[in-house]
Amino acid sequence: MIILTTGFIFLIVLMSVITYEQTNQHLYDIWESEVQHNEHHLKSSLQLINQGLLLFDHTFDKSMKDQFSIVLDAYNQSGGDPARMNVTEIKSRFSPDVIDIADVYIINENGIVIDATYKGDIGLDFKKWPNVYEVITRIRNGSVFEADRAVYGFSSVKESRKFAYYPTPDHRYLLEISYYIRDFTEDRRNFSYANVMRAFVNETPHLRSVTLYDSMFRTLWSMDDQKRSSDPAAIQYIQKAFQGTDRIKISDPVNSSETYYYFIDISDDKTASGTMLDMVARIEYDTTVMQRHLDSIRLFHALVALIAGLLGFFIAYLLAYHITRPIRRIIDDINRIAHGDLNHRVSYSGSHEFSELETSLNLLISHLNDLISSLQEKEHHLRESKEEYQRLVEKLNEGIWIVDQDEKTTFVNTRMAEMLEASPEDLIGRSTFDIIHPSYHEIIREKMKNRKSGLSERYEIPLVTAKNRQIIAEISASPSFDPYSRYTGSFGVVTDITKRKENEQKIRLYALQMEERTKELEAVRDQLFQINADLDRIVQTRTEEVMRLLEQKNDFIMQLGHDLRTPLTPILGLLPRLDELDGEEHANMVRIIERNARHIQNIASKSLKLARLNSLDYIPECDDIDLAETIRSVLEINRMSLRQAHIETHVEVPEGCIIQGDQILIQELIDNLISNSIKFSKPSGGYIRIQVKRDDDTITLTVKDTGIGLMAGEEVLIFEEFYKSDRSRHDKSSTGLGLAICRKIVQKHHGTIIASSDGPDQGTTFTIVLPIRCDTPGNQQ
């Protein structure tokens, strides 16, 4: 009986201890789960708000970049000397819509603000913040515009400003512009950290205090608005939180509180102040309620153990009166309750003593039910908080896309589903590679590696919709990690930029077309200018040619009349006397008349030939001419004249020297030149040298004599019609047309002829250059 009593007491105590430990552990697990959920909810909300603020901040970039052109012009006009710049006057030239919110700064190479329209920042030294100083130094040594985030100023925490930077051309200074975000409070209200914190406070039970700190350990937001200064005792914990990624837990049983320090990573390494955006949240929970539950349960189980001990002394007696069955029923009921059926109650045994035990056990069960109800109520609050967060996400105009560590889609909002032309339910569980275009798979694998390394990125990707239509999206992707720094996936803010890309492509194509049209118009314009110039030149040339020909025609008519009248005078004078004369005198008169008539015939013949050569319609024949044979033929014709003039000939013509041209004209050309040399030879005789040289496309014919030579300036005049050199020694029978005919023959064959002489009695040299073939482009023309 003692053994049974002792065993019964031990069983009651053991069951009480086990139930207490289970309940105690369950309470702590629920508490820890709630704390972790609150932490994750707060981090996700702040990171999401940061993404919204990032999109809002970028709307100022173009405006700020436009204002820099004014500052740069002023810097260039000052000769690169900031002391000669008036930043207030420069600011007055800004666009009217930003002049009231803008400020201008000049930062030297030591990172010190040497001048600014915001006087509170003059003398500010960025070396106090090494990360920021390193970034602005990199920008100063660069050559491009870079926009910063909207952050609290370095010298004040009361104003939020949007900053942007532009280096001077000589890289000695960094120009800075800031916009005061005061006038855009309404626009930023949807992206407020304070709203998130107030919602967090309202939705989180057991909170005693919540405080948000920035990277400079300044209080950004506090649950107690009056408590804005940072607690010096908390600075050490804040520094540790910034240095590591694990949360810091501080328990204070005396004050019934638990304090947590969380590091919230929302940094942006692409901007100068991006590394200062990280925050630390200090959350203090009131553990009084949980402690009371634990104390109540502990007291209850102590009472149960005490009651069990007291009742043990009476069990032997009860057992003696057949109470084993009621005890077994109680044990069965307790086992059923221990297995989770907390709605079950211990059956009434009919005994007063057992009734009290049943009442105590039922009281314990009631306490457990109350505790479970409280936990269920907390779970309900958590569920409502999650639903509120989901409604906030659904209201965004941008798509939200969340994937797990296996790149499987776990959540998309309605906007994201609309982009992909599917329902959110159809997208859940789909792989990233099912949504991203295959051409981008290799690149997205690299992006996933960056995400697992903790990098956030912004890039453009092609997506394939459920209707197999391709769209272009811009995504800002960030990684997610659990409290143990294990990668759990990533989330991205997605914007459909398909229309923008199409418009950009259309603009580029239109610009290319306009550029091509412009080039075509410029080419046509240049051609018109050239045509006009050519026409002007041709008209001028033709006009000069016509005037020259008219003048030449007048001279020709006058000279022809004079030359015809000279031989006609003796004819007309002698004809009346022919009947009066006879014998030898009559014969002499006839010979004089005949000689003068033949001279008139020679002049008429050569004049007609010259006129024919001057005709634009006249085209010489194109025959194969053997120059050696032609020269020999001409010399044979003039053999007697050469002998009478005591002139020797020297001929240097290569055999087989064939050119194409008019056989009759070429022979007359050579004959005229040899006859000219004979006429103007010295009485003592001399020699004529004829030489032919051949090149690839031309031949050069040289006729050199030892005659009377030329006066200075006669090298051109001798080719004019009726020109006669040195009339005192000139042959009276000469017409003065021979060399003019030579020039026209050479011109008709598209060649050149020039005369040269070292002076009187030094002989004359004629040089003729003719093309070998008459089918050259010049001849065809």
Image (cartoon, grey):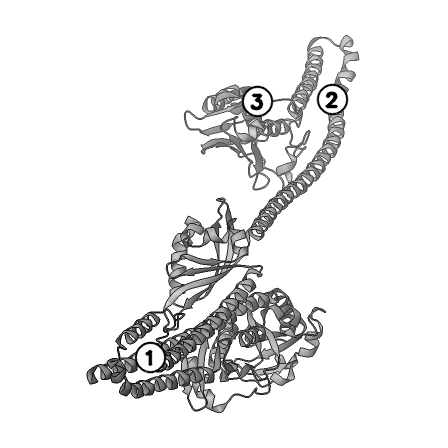
Q: Regarding mark 1 in the picture, which secondary structure is present there?
A: helix
Q: Nearer the viewer, mark 1 or mark 2?
A: 1
Q: Nearer the viewer, mark 1 or mark 3?
A: 1
Q: Which mark is residue 564?
A: 2
Q: Say which quadrant the C terminus sits in.
A: top right
Q: Regarding mark 2 in the picture, which secondary structure is present there?
A: helix
Q: Are marks 1 and 2 in contact (CB under 8 Å)?
A: no
Q: Which mark is residue 21?
A: 1
Where residue 688 appears, as percent x and y from the top left, is 50, 31
Q: Are marks 3 and 2 in contact (CB under 8 Å)?
A: no
**Of 192 and 558, which appears nearest the observer?**
192
* Residue at the front extreme, as displayed: 321
Q: Which residue is mark 3?
A: 665
Q: Regarding mark 3 in the picture, which secondary structure is present there?
A: helix
**Of 495 and 649, which appears nearest the observer?**
495
Q: Amino acid at mark 2?
A: Leu
Q: Say which quadrant the N terminus sits in.
A: bottom left
